[in-house]
Amino acid sequence: MLTRFLPLVGCLLSYTLVPSAAAQSCGSQGIALQVLGSGGPELQDKRASSSYLVWENGQARVLIDAGGGSALRFGESGAQMSQLDVILFSHFHIDHSGDFAALIMSSWFEDRKRPLAIYGPQGNGFMPSTTEFVSDLFGAKQGAYRYLSELFVPGEQGSYKLQPHVVVVGSTPVAVFRSGDLAVSAVRVVHAAVPALAWRVEAGGKAIVFSGDTNGEGEGLVRLAKNADLFIAHNAVPEGATGVERSLHMPPSVIGQIAKDANVKRLVLSHRMLRTLGKEDQTQAEIKKRYLGPVLSQTTLTALA
Ligand SMILES: [Zn+2]
């Protein structure tokens, strides 16, 4: 079993693992992925819930998801909300979005002037759309945190504005956002009845793909992850999962097959839950039947990552 130990809030460079003590922030040169939260919704996993940062040359440029605990990890990372070009949501389950308001509150104390783009899925009867989600928090009339509506409502005197966008895509990757050398694309993925997206972030000649939560059905994720330098897959259920669990999440065999079909250079297992923690040998064995590249599984020393 190949297990690598990452520091608590470690940086995962495209080719090298470096201890967080080595730098105030990740990726002072080039592109780095930082796992802010590798847990699921259970607090007993002792991890922050899903959240990732993509750094470029020491700047935190993209935040993907903001599950519970990620705001603290964001602060520990040395990142600034004013550095971000964009926030991407895979979907709006609490373990992917619960700390969003805390991050925005912190940004109020920074000197951000430019708008902050936010992209995420459309809604349905079960979930808000990305625009509704932001409005439900910061809208002037009904927002739970309407005292901060200046950061959302046009015409109010906020230092900057949140700009949410709904992404409607199918299984063919679509370009969603571009800023300088940063390019972001998405596909729809199947996560039971929850509208959900997988994301590909390209910058500095590297491509990092985030599965988000998905049961792995369809061709979209393989297309999106094609030849990626890093593929972050959510390892929320063990092999043999059935029922609701399986309709929401992909077992290790499916992760391995997608990593193989997409020819990704490295695979990172995240969104660990109590039902997959402690099953690393079985998980790795299922993946290795299909995907022969390196697999990074944060299991022990990264419990707080
Ligand atoms: Zn979910």
Image: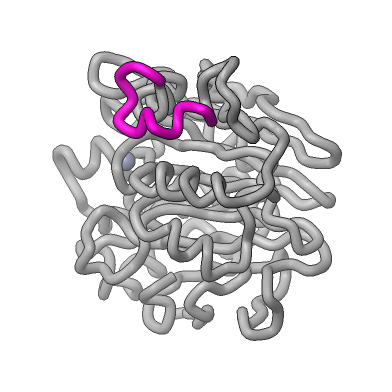
Give the quarter of the figure containing the N terminus: bottom left
- The quadrant in which residue 92 appears is top left
In the depicted structure, whether residue 14 falls above or below residue 164? below
In the depicted structure, whether residue 101 falls above or below residue 121? below
Q: Is residue 244 left or right of residue 277?
A: left
The residue closer to the viewer here, 105 or 83, is 105
Q: Is residue 180 left or right of residue 171?
A: right
Residue farthest along the front direction in this orientation: 157
Q: Residue 153 at x, y = what percent?
A: 52, 19
Q: Is residue 139 left or right of residue 44?
A: right
Write the residue at 43% across / 58% down.
70
Q: Residue 36 at x, y = what percent?
A: 49, 62
| Magenta residue check for 183 | no
In the depicted structure, whether residue 302 falls above or below residue 233? below
- The quadrant in which residue 94 appears is top left
The residue closer to the viewer here, 215 or 80, is 80
Give the quarter of the figure containing the C terminus: bottom left
Write the residue at 56% across / 31% down.
118
Q: Residue 95 at x, y = what percent?
A: 32, 48
Residue farthest along the left direction in this orientation: 243
Q: Residue 161 at x, y = what percent?
A: 60, 28
Q: Is residue 80 left or right of residue 283?
A: right
Residue 109 makes an appearance in the image: yes
Q: Quadrant of ligand 1?
A: top left
Write the residue at 49% across / 28% down.
120
What is the span of residues highlighted in magenta in the rendered image? 140-151
The residue closer to the viewer here, 17 or 253, is 17
